[in-house]
């Protein structure tokens, strides 16, 4: 198969497909999709492995470690599946390659640093908002949760507010 | 009736549930990748105005899932509110707005959101991997910061409980779904205009858009049509009965979990009522807005006798509704009437029930009861002490 890195599904069909995945999650599991919750559980598991005593005394961390392993949760398995799905999707479309995606005016190292920094901000923000774009905006938004809609508009507002300042990273 | 037993998948069928979780996640990751969401440039283009794919995919997914959920609920195949309460978090307005703004900043800096960074990492993108690591660190940072009291207080601010747009608008969910679908389709057309202005791109193929729009319109219409189904589809089970003893226990043990409504005429209620009860004679019920208030507490209805049938205002309550068996008369006989002490040598269960009732009657009427008879001679103490003493000495 020829590598075809920029040909994607039609956005409306992709949206409908994503919506059907989400709907099946509601109907079968009674839950929505998520991502950042699993990251937190992974992090707590890592902390537990490095500093076993710490999780028990940190009020913000011990909640997910109380009944057994923090990794024993549906979200962790769902995210494992998402990584597999991403891998298969990229492989079959010829997009599986080891590289750092960046704009023409930024070095690889700077791009990786910014990616890490943005990740830290998002991890913090997702915990604060009780969910990220997947768990809060998508899953809550489709069930018409008022907080999810407030969150979703705030995400777009935050992105547009700083896009101009970081344009050198992308354009 | 629901299509799938998700209680079973979370309980006894947990292993099957986790396999289903991997399968659903696989679909999620695969579709995100195929939409182009494993590539940072595709995602951030949203914020530079020339490619609004993120917006289209996201709102397309929201509208699809929303219409699906509304139609399935309208047909009685899914309980919209039960699924919503389990699949969404309660609304905490201020931390959600602050978190959204911050997440938007993190999105444009990292080029991903937490879910898409995972897909990017899985397809070999090193920046995606760096973002995944950053997200984990960020969530841990938040967990540590919860030890700081003012921050922890902020994270709980603006608490509105489980709040949905259809509650705010006082419309049926199907009507709100139609409005959202119309708004989304209007925005999609507008988004394509913007793309042409900023990106100068040729108009994308119109056929898939027409197909998806037609699907939305059909589903929205089907959702509205289910409103016309006979209300019998949404059968209301008979409210559970509660014995006076069980009510006494709930009122004394956890009064914050129950809301006792006394529906007798106001004069009777004002004279004597269950502790903590609100006087809610029929003409006052509509002022309580039971359909709109938080369903967190269980409502217990106290009538002259067993209140049946229940007034519509109470049936509209979204939480659990229980009816006091026998009404206030039964409560009076149970809780406000002195009890005869059991005969010496009575069983442990009988003694325990006497203690509870005597304590209750004493507390509510101010009349001291006779102490229970001494334990039987064979030394079968009615209250067992834990072996080895309490937690401190043990």
Image (cartoon, rainbow, N blue to C red):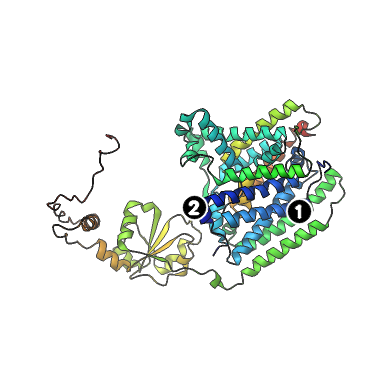
Chain of the residue displaying label 1? A
Q: Position of residue B243 (x, y in %)?
A: 32, 63
Q: Position of residue B387 (x, y in %)?
A: 25, 41
Instruction: Quarter of the image for the N terminus of chain A: give it.
Output: top right
Do tag 1 and tag 2 residues touch (Cβ < 8 Å)? Answer: no
Which sits in the foreground, B272 or B65?
A: B65
Residue at 82% in and 47% down: B195
Mark 2 packing: few (<14 Cα in 10 Å), some, or many (20+)? few
Chain of the residue displaying label 2? B
Is B61 situated left or right of A39 in this image? right
Asked if marks 1 and 2 fall on the same chain, the answer is: no
Which sits in the foreground, B145 or B25?
A: B25
Task: Kindly report which numbered mark, 1 or 2, lies closer to the viewer in this rendering.
Answer: 2
Q: Position of residue A68 (x, y in %)?
A: 47, 40
Residue at 48% in and 38% down: A65
Q: Which residue is mark 2?
A: B11
Is B150 situated left or right of B308 in this image? right
Residue extending furthest toward the left: B377
Mark 1 packing: few (<14 Cα in 10 Å), some, or many (20+)? many
Q: Position of residue B11 (x, y in %)?
A: 49, 52
Which sits in the foreground, B353 or B55?
A: B353
Q: Which residue is mark 1?
A: A12
């Amino acid at each position: 198969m020829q590598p075809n890195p920029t040909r994607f599904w039609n956005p409306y069909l992709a949206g409908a497909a994503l919506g059907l995945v989400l709907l099946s999650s509601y109907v079968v599991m009674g839950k929505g999709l998520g991502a950042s919750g699993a990251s937190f559980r992974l992090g707590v598991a890592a902390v537990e492995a490095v500093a076993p005593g710490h999780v028990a005394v940190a009020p913000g961390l011990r909640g997910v470690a109380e009944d057994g392993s923090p990794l024993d949760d549906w979200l962790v398995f769902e995210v494992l599946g998402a990584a597999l799905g991403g891998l298969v999707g990229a492989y079959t479309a010829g997009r599986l390659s080891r590289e750092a995606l960046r704009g023409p005016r930024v070095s690889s190292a700077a791009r990786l640093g910014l990616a890490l920094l943005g990740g830290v901000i998002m991890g913090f923000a997702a915990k604060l908002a009780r969910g990220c774009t997947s768990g809060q905006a998508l899953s809550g938004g489709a069930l018409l949760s008022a907080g999810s809609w407030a969150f979703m508009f705030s995400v777009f507002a935050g992105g547009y507010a700083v896009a101009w300042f970081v344009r050198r990273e992308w354009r | 009736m629901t299509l799938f037993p998700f209680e079973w998948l979370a309980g006894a069928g947990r292993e099957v549930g986790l396999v289903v979780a991997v399968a659903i996640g696989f679909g999620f990751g695969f579709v995100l990748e195929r939409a182009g969401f494993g590539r940072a440039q595709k995602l951030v283009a949203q914020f530079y105005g020339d490619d609004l794919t993120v917006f289209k995919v996201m709102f397309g997914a929201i509208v699809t899932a929303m219409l699906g959920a509304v139609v399935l609920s309208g047909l009685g195949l899914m309980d919209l509110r039960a699924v919503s309460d389990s699949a969404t978090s309660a609304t905490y307005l201020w931390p959600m707005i602050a978190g959204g703004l911050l997440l938007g900043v993190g999105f444009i800096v990292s080029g991903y959101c937490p879910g898409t960074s995972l897909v990017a990492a899985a397809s070999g993108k090193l920046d995606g991997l760096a973002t995944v690591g950053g997200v984990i660190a960020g969530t841990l940072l938040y967990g540590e910061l919860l030890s700081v009291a003012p921050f922890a207080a902020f994270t709980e601010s603006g608490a509105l409980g489980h709040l949905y747009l259809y509650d705010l608008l006082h419309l049926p969910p199907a009507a709100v779904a139609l409005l959202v679908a119309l708004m989304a389709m209007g925005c999609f057309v507008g988004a394509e205009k913007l793309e042409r202005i900023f990106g100068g791109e040729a108009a994308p193929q119109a056929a898939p858009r027409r197909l998806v729009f037609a699907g939305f319109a059909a589903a929205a219409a089907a959702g509205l049509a289910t409103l016309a189904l006979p209300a019998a589809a949404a059968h209301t089970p008979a409210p559970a009965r509660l014995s006076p003893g069980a009510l006494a226990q709930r009122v004394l043990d956890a009064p914050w979990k129950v809301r006792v409504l006394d529906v007798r005429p106001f004069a009777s209620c004002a004279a004597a009522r269950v502790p903590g009860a609100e006087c809610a004679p029929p003409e006052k019920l509509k002022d309580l807005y039971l359909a709109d208030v938080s369903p967190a507490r269980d409502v217990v209805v106290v009538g002259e006798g067993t209140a049946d049938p229940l007034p519509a205002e109470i049936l509209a309550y979204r939480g659990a509704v229980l009816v006091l068996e026998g009404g206030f008369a039964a409560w009076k006989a149970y809780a406000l009437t002195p009890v005869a002490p059991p005969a010496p040598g009575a069983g442990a269960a009988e003694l325990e029930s006497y203690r509870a009732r005597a304590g209750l009657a004493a507390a509510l009427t101010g009349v001291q009861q006779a102490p229970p008879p001494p334990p039987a001679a064979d030394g079968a103490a009615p209250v067992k002490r834990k072996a080895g003493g309490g937690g401190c000495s043990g």
